[in-house]
Amino acid sequence: DWSRLQGSERFAKFVQKQCADKNQREGALARLKAVLSAHARSLSFVFMMFSASAADKNDVSMMRSAEFNILWKWAGLIDESSKRCKQSDFDSILIVTDASDDVEEGGASSAKDGVLMRFEFLEAFVRIAVQRFVRESMECNEAATACEKLIATLATALEEHRGIGDEAHAATVANLRQSQRERATLPLCWDDKRNEWRKRYLYNKGCDDMVRAHLTRLDKLYKKNISRDRAKSRLWTLDVWIKVLEQIDFFDQTFTYQQACYCFCMAKMTVVDEVYSR
């Protein structure tokens, strides 16, 4: 992701331009890289977590404008009373960052439709940090320190909120019992704890015995439902996953399409090159 950003002359000039001291501009990219690298796993996880929270799309590896705005609203960054952090300002950042025409031929593309890939989200993150902490509040004088502030703000907001949702979702779960509401709400967190979850719930004797007892059936189920256009790679797509759950009538008020997308995405391994290795 950083290699793609660093190779963009537009992005490099933007970062250097934010330094109040012109003598500090030469090392601006290096300082920013150090900050983003220290939190790379968490930033990648937040991107994936919010991308997966949309239930009406076939690709959970990209972040739509709706989820992009939900993230920053949750973090309390969108403020209509401010000069530079209104909803329109965030919309402009999304448009500027959507650099799908910069992706090489043959790679994945977000098609200039308000959808961000992970490296584009990273650029948007930097631009939002600058917008909020350099231009709006003037608390910072360069992109690196602004990103440190935004990371702290976002981490706190994510840990304080109990889950992702919207007004329609809130109305749907309003009549459920507390335990049901908790199951119907996607968890929020800053740290990527998927490996800890696997060690606790997946990599144990009880789960191993259960899977082994049904391994033949599970193998047949998997092979039977492999998407035709992905047969060579032997992979299930999100569409296949949803259809199988529909066939067994698995969805209800406590397990929604949104959660199905979320589970699918959480089970996938993170790849280094999202453009060619998704």
Image (tube, rainbow, N blue to C red):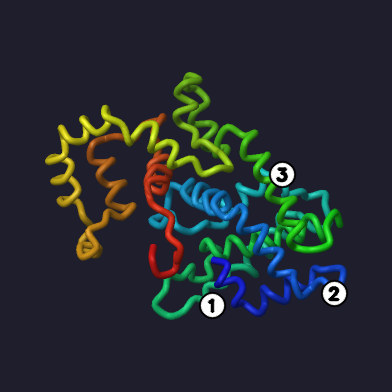
Question: Gap in Å between the C-alphas at discs 1 and 3?
Answer: 31 Å
As rendered, which of 124 and 139 lies closer to the eye?
139
Q: Position of residue 244 (x, y in %)?
A: 25, 44
Q: Secondary structure at mark 1?
A: helix
Q: Earlier in the sequence, mark 1 or mark 2?
A: 2
User: Where is 152 relative to 88, above or below?
Assistant: above
Q: Nearer the viewer, mark 1 or mark 2?
A: 2
As rendered, which of 148 and 30 lies closer to the eye?
30
Q: Earlier in the sequence, mark 2 or mark 3?
A: 2
Numbered disc total:
3
| Label 1 neighbour load within 10 Å: few <14, some 14-19, many 20+ | few
Q: Is residue 135 visible?
A: no
Are circles 2 and 3 on residues that touch, CB within 8 Å? no
| Label 2 neighbour load within 10 Å: few <14, some 14-19, many 20+ | few
Quarter of the view holding residue 127: bottom right
Q: Position of residue 14 (x, y in %)?
A: 73, 72
Quadrant in which the C terminus appears? bottom left
User: Where is 125 relative to 5, above or below?
Assistant: above
Q: Nearer the viewer, mark 2 or mark 3?
A: 2
Q: Residue at x 76, y 60 (%)?
A: 131
Q: Is 222 on the left or on the right of 4, as rendered?
A: left
Which residue is denoted by mark 2 in the rendering?
Answer: 23
Instruction: Please state which amino acid type lies under the numbered disc 1.
Output: Asp
Which residue is denoted by mark 1 in the rendering?
Answer: 102
Q: Earlier in the sequence, mark 1 or mark 3?
A: 3
Which residue is denoted by mark 3 in the rendering?
Answer: 76
